[in-house]
Amino acid sequence: MVVYSELQNHEKVDWSNGNTFNTLIYAFGLYFIFIIISKMKLIPNILVLGLLLLMYILNSQREFLHKSNVITNKDNEYYRKYIYSIAIFIGIVCIVGVYDYYKYQKIQYGKEFNILLFWFSDKSCDYLK
């Protein structure tokens, strides 16, 4: 059995070798996820954030174990497929969550509802008015 402290000594973390182009793409992706999450109700929002956290943890652990030669290439691919299926499920939850919130806003505002304002306006809480 491999001891966790032994695995820590195999791979050192180096944050200085990041690719700027990839970082920029990730930043835009995260901003897009933020916009989508802001257009959902609480339960789908919590579900998406929880699944994103799970996906991050699994992927980080997969990379660590693979670089440490603890898992085989077959196990690595199994992890990748599992993480991919979580990403697909996140997409489905986002689509359903945004559609549910869209219907909610359309009912709430009636004829005053505007799709551009739905996507690009800031939301003000009616409670604070």
Image: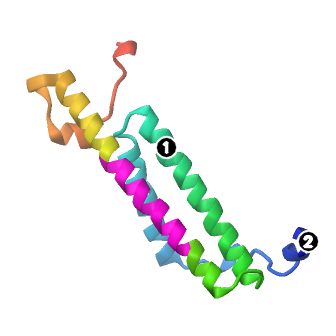
Q: Alpha-carbon distance for marks 1 and 2?
A: 33 Å
Residue 13 marker:
none
Span highlighted in magenta in the image: 80-95
Left or right of 46, for residue 107: left
Q: Quadrant of the C terminus?
A: top left
Which residue is denoted by mark 1 in the rendering? 47
Amino acid at the residue labelled 2? Val
Q: Residue at x 45, y 40 (%)?
A: 45
Which percent across, then down, holds residue 38?
39, 40
Q: Nearer the viewer, residue 23 or 49?
A: 49
Q: Nearer the viewer, residue 26 or 81?
A: 81
Which percent across, then down, holds residue 18?
60, 77
Taking the magenta stretch, the answer to whether it contains residue 93 is: yes
Type of secondary structure dominating the magenta stretch: helix
Q: Residue at x 52, y 47 (%)?
A: 49
Dividing the picture into quarters, in which one does residue 71 lie? bottom right
Left or right of 75, for residue 38: left
Which residue is denoted by mark 2 in the rendering? 3
Badge 1 vs badge 2, beta-carbon distance below 8 Å: no
The local crowd at label 1, few if under 14, some if 14 to 19, many if 20 or more residues have their Cα within 10 Å, is some
In the rendered structure, which disc, 1 or 2, sits on the residue that comes first in sequence?
2
Q: Residue at x 42, y 49 (%)?
A: 34
Whether residue 120 is visible: no
The local crowd at label 2, few if under 14, some if 14 to 19, many if 20 or more residues have their Cα within 10 Å, is few
Which percent across, then down, holds residue 62?
66, 72
